[in-house]
Image (cartoon, grey):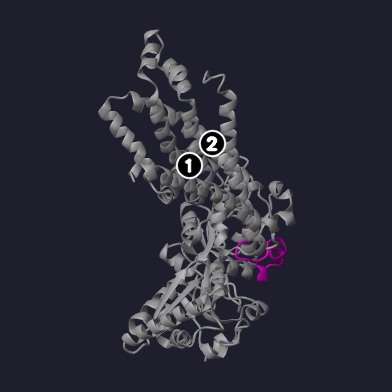
Amino acid sequence: MRVSAWSDPVFRWLCMICATLCGLLMVAFFVQLAFASGDAWSRFGLGFFVSTDWDPVRDLYGALPAIAGTVATTVIALVIALPLAFVSALFIVDAPPWLSRVLGQAVDLLAAIPSIIYGMWGLFVLVPLMDRLWVAWGVDNAFGGIGLLTSSLILSLMILPYICAVMRDVLRMTPPMLRESAFGVGCTRWETARDILMRYGIRGLLGGIFIGLGRALGETMAVLFVAGNIMKVPTGLLDGCTTIAATLANNFAEAEGVQRSALFALGLILLVMAFAIQVLAQYYLRMTSAKRGEK
Amino acid sequence: MKQMSIVSVAAAAALFLAGCGEGNGNGGAVTLNGAGASFPDPVYQAWTYIYSTANDTTVNYQSIGSGAGINQIKAGTVDFAGTDAPLKREEIQQAKLTQFPMVTGAVTPIVNIAGVGPGQLKLTDEVLAKIFMGEIKTWDDPAITALNPGLKLPKQNILVVYRSDSSGTTNIFTEYLTDKSPDWATKVGAGKSVKWPTGLGGQKNPGVCNNVQQNSGSIGYTEFTYAIESKLTTVQMKAADGSWQNPDSASWPLVGTTYLLVRDDIPADKKAALQAYVAWCFSGDAAAKAKELHYTPLTAERAKQSRYFLGALKDEFVK
């Protein structure tokens, strides 16, 4: 029997099994988290989402501070990282080959740094720096250099290389003919970037953003060090805060009973948030595909 | 048929293991694995190292946190567990565990105030509780200056720093405040983590120490060894007899005891090895090492007086 006669079906089955396994694993995560958090849901109900309590002594738990902290750090981190990642990607694509290679690798290296290193760098370097900055500017900083803005800055640094790497590849994929035509009809570099590169690679660009978003949502160690771990909804950029992932890391080892269940409930919320972002992204792309002329 | 094969495999495995044991010569080499509380970790590491190099028995201890240690011993994955928050009688009986105290250590408030050196600031229990509740907000508050007539205290906001992770050190600290301040007891209470009315959280002992070091005007609490290692400014507190004491004193009031947990169904060989190790921990050599690391060693008599000295095997371990 020729090799190709049986290798293809075997390969197909192997792929199918692996793909199914991934899907099943995802479902299993949901089931496990839902099951383990049942106690918290039955005790606190939907009030869990809006309660700001986190009182292990009286066994009262609420998710709002952690959810608010997670959303706030992620959104601010994206706002900072996105323009930086886009312009770096643009520059790297257009730069002379040797410079492009050096810069590209430097950005890739940023992605290779373990998050605990970012956390320690944040705690020992960035936090005192921010503290001095606020003091110099005369801003009232009750928490020193720790807080929402510092966490977001660290996060933006961490997600920047991911977004930038994806954007770089996407921008490179644009057919040179399109770009040259744009230049040919008198477009500026920015117009070419906005109307040709961005439009052509929107799917990939958004993909890069969602990779960064996913990473920012779930990032734990770095935020743990610089957020201040305060179970309150932050009201300003300099306020201390916490995130879902940081709350889990802080309390999981020692948690029992209701608190453990509440932590599982937080985990479920985080998973649903990440899942919802994916679904919404796909939905958005489908809704707008006609407008972008993909059909 | 299936049953048979499992039995025969088990028998073969047992034979194989027995053969290995004999091959070892005396068959006395036992490895004891422990895990739990991080508060006594420095002294446990020293003890297990000294004991393991001098004896056949190898003792390992992993500092994974009191709660995690309790879960591990209940699941039977470790031979002993360390905990700072002792289990209650019912839980000991239900889980069939034995619990006994091992060593005590001081927890100390640490401060970072410009111009204030180690042991200069004096704080009463009531003032300490009020600071951590956010009711005393500045260092030049009359309640603090009245206790420290000679000390120049700045007009600066107090930043409270606490342990963000759930920890035995927090349990010791909040138990103490609950005990001394009725206000604290009703508003906050005691536990491995509590709802802090003010301040920011640092991750583990190093996180707290670092936050205090970096922020002028801050106050935190940590285990005494860590305060010395990080060269932090400690304070004086009032002992039971009303005198002012530094944390290195024997009558320092804010102390915590840490406990060991053993399963009642521990195998005989491990039990013998663990008994020998625990006996050594209560010996003079071990006590000297503990003192060197700024812990306060316990004698076996003192350990027996503890109200958390519980379980079926307690008298077999602490003699």
Asked where in the image residue B180 lies, by quadrant, the reply is bottom right
Asked if the stretch drawn in magenta spans residue B187, the answer is yes
Extent of the magenta region: B178-198
Front residue of B92/B27: it is B27
**Residue visible at 25% across and 29% down in the picture:** A98
Q: Which residue is mark 1?
A: A155
Q: Position of residue A99 (x, y in %)?
A: 28, 29
In terms of secondary structure, where does tag 2 sit?
helix
Asked where in the image residue A70 lies, by quadrant, the reply is top right
Q: Position of residue A89 (x, y in %)?
A: 39, 29
Q: Position of residue B199 (x, y in %)?
A: 59, 53
**Residue visible at 51% across and 51% down in the picture:** A224
- Horizontal side of A77 relative to A90 (left or right) equals right
- Horizontal side of A159 relative to B259 (left or right) equals left
In terms of secondary structure, where does tag 1 sit?
helix
Q: Position of residue A133 (x, y in %)?
A: 46, 39
Chain of the residue under label 1: A
Q: Which residue is mark 2?
A: A76
Marks 1 and 2 in Cβ contact (< 8 Å): yes
Chain of the residue under label 2: A
Seen in the picture, residue A100 relative to A34 is either above or below; the reply is above
| Amino acid tagged 2 | Ile
Front residue of B117/A169: it is A169
> Marks 1/2: CA distance?
9 Å
- Horizontal side of B207 relative to A54 (left or right) equals left
Front residue of A37/B243: it is A37
